[in-house]
Amino acid sequence: NAGVTQTPKFRILKIGQSMTLQCTQDMNHNYMYWYRQDPGMGLKLIYYSVGAGITDKGEVPNGYNVSRSTTEDFPLRLELAAPSQTSVYFCASSYQVTEAFFGQGTRLTVV
Amino acid sequence: AQSVTQLDSQVPVFEEAPVELRCNYSSSVSVYLFWYVQYPNQGLQLLLKYLSGSTLVESINGFEAEFNKSQTSFHLRKPSVHISDTAEYFCAVSEGYGGATNKLIFGTGTLLAVQP
């Protein structure tokens, strides 16, 4: 099993550009999450999903969008990139909320 | 809404000494509690979890944590640390099965720095 796979691993965006961070899992988990990690701030929940077709906002959703058309995929969309979105982004999945499995992260820099 | 507080941003400790990393949570309903570990440039890995039953839970590498409902705490302990335990440790909480939100919320993390 590959677990949770995130692409790309690194990306540099210019202010105002858009991009999609991809996340896919092969464990048939119903829950999926997107977090951002900033130094000294821990992980902040951006969006989460409890199943295909269902998404909800987390702690810091502004500037992001998500969709969950399949159980496996949970892409995160940045529409107008801003320097404040420079961060490391982690995708995770779990069966209910018992144990989350994390991807290796995407390091995003907005310049 | 649930929240997690890790008061110590960094804990320096000498090798073979005991350590305690503190975690307090707030929630209006029953909770599941977790400790995750992150090594440099990696994702998070589950260290241990409390879902129900015994309030003392253990990991395979010697860490343990105790769920204390009255003090709303889930402190992580190890009686003797190794250099290889150097990492950042995150406490997390989610509302128990059937809770209104089922979100998984993390604390700000504690860097455990083990010195020889």
Image (spheres, rainbow, N blue to C red):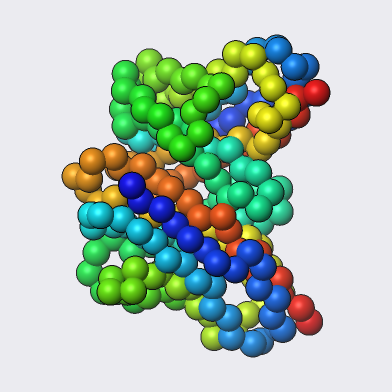
**Residue A8: horizontal and vertical position, in percent?**
67, 26
Q: Is residue B31 above or below residue B59?
A: above
Number of residue marks: 0
Residue B47 visible? The answer is no
**Residue A100: horizontal and vertical position, in percent?**
43, 46
Q: Give the residue furthest to the left.
A: B98
Q: Is residue A22 above or below residue A5?
A: above
**Residue B23: horizontal and vertical position, in percent?**
46, 67
Q: Is residue B30 above or below residue B1?
A: below
Place residue A105 in its image quadrant.
Answer: top right
User: Is residue A72 found left or right of A110 in the rendered image?
Assistant: left
**Residue B58: horizontal and vertical position, in percent?**
41, 73
Residue B93 visible? The answer is yes
Quadrant (top left/top right/bottom left/bottom right) for the C terminus of chain A: top right
Residue appearing at x 38%, y 15% in the figure: A69
User: Is residue B41 found left or right of B18 in the rendered image?
Assistant: right
Place residue A54 in its image quadrant.
Answer: top left
